[in-house]
Image: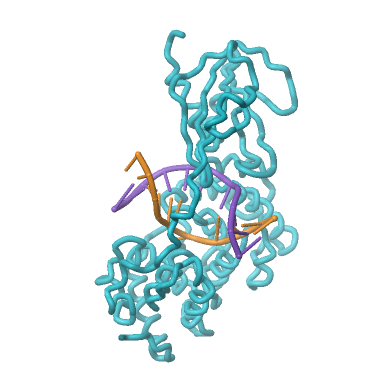
Chain colours: A cyan, B purple, C orange
Amino acid sequence: MSSFNPSLSNISDFRTHLLAWYRLNRRELPWRYQQNAPPDPYKVWLSEIMLQQTTVTAVIPYFQKFIKKWPTLCDLAQSPQEEIIDMWAGLGYYSRARNLHKCARQVLQNHQSVFPNTEKELLTLAGIGPYTAAAILSIAYNKPANIVDGNVERFMARFFMLKKPLRDIKPLIKNKASVFVGDYEGDHSDYSQSLMELGALICTPQSPKCEQCPVHHYCESYANNFQNKIPTRISKENKPLRPQRHGHAYLIKNKKNEILVERREEKGLLANTIGIPTSQWVDHKKEKEHLPLYNKNDFKEIEERINHVFTHFELELSVYVSETLKIDQSNKYYWISEENLKRKLPTVFKKVYNSQEKLSPKK
DNA sequence: AACGCGTGGAA
DNA sequence: TTTCCAAGCGT
């Protein structure tokens, strides 16, 4: 059995192969500064927050429009939170947008608008945890940092052929990864990115391309043909099925072609986002028991219900449309023009909004 | 420590 | 179709 011997020369060789591969194969990404140009910590931070649990493809257009609207951290920090949340609509995990705004203000007020360059200080900032702190330290400031994301976890589990479920060996993996992060003279920015790039392009979740891997000669799983068996995960037999919930959504228009919406509450799902009014969301089986917000007789019901999958439950919404309903003015709801609404809705409400096209002409 | 928190693309 | 899961964090 081969086994990676973490001698200084092997570690150096590992890094040399990895970096050489990266410099030939790296993707050009909007937040990835040109070679030999200094990185902008603001762009590094913004991209890393957006990339948390989110694919590169999904992030790119959001990153572009954020940088266009807020070219610097000061621009972002001076903007009201709602504008940031609304620009974030569709990207998911909205607490990231809330923390983005909070973090920008922290940096503006406590760090003279410059991201700090120590782990201790970075971890005090909203939305920055161990991974993102390490990413900023290495990518933006070229400082040694043990960057461990999902890519690195998968790579390390395979490289050292760790057969236990990923969930149970995260501390071990972090310890294994730290072997490669000494206080070297080398390029810590490229090293961090190369490891993640390798996970994204070569050491992929399914069907890793081991023949193309620049460090496969050190990989225990490759030597034992275990690369498709690792990492292992906890069996999901014990996991409960995703609950199904149901509710009513009310698409209410006035004569000015405006839609009735609310600013959702500060906590919980879709916090602080713009929402279309709905009833409570109740267990699917208790569909008949929930309390509608309005009298059905004032609405036309769209036959085709919309479905949306959240992380922990699925939601089915019956959509009711009215263009004649009289609305009591309250603090909770307000009118917004359809034009302004279009890109400001979380996806679940965008589906509700779009379903009006399916309203049959008569009924 | 385990769970809540979105979305869309791939297989 | 279903399932997995992508550059995690906060509580």
Residue at x 63% of width, y 53% of height: A100
Q: Nearer the viewer, residue A307 or A82?
A: A307
The residue sitting at the left extreme is A211
Q: In the rendered image, which quarter is residue A11 located in?
A: bottom left
- Where is residue C2 drawn, in percent x and y? 38, 44
Answer above or below: position of A225 versus A110: below
Relative to A20, is A52 on the left or the right? Answer: right
The residue sitting at the top extreme is A362
**Can the viewer see residue A94?**
yes
Q: Nearer the viewer, residue A199 or A59?
A: A199
Residue at x 73% of width, y 20% of height: A329
- Where is residue A217 drawn, in percent x and y? 29, 81
Answer above or below: position of A143 versus A333: below
| Quarter of the N terminus of chain A within the rendering | bottom left
Total residue callouts: 0
Q: In the rendered image, which quarter is residue A303 located in?
A: top left
**Can the viewer see residue A75?**
no
- Where is residue A311 drawn, in percent x and y? 51, 47
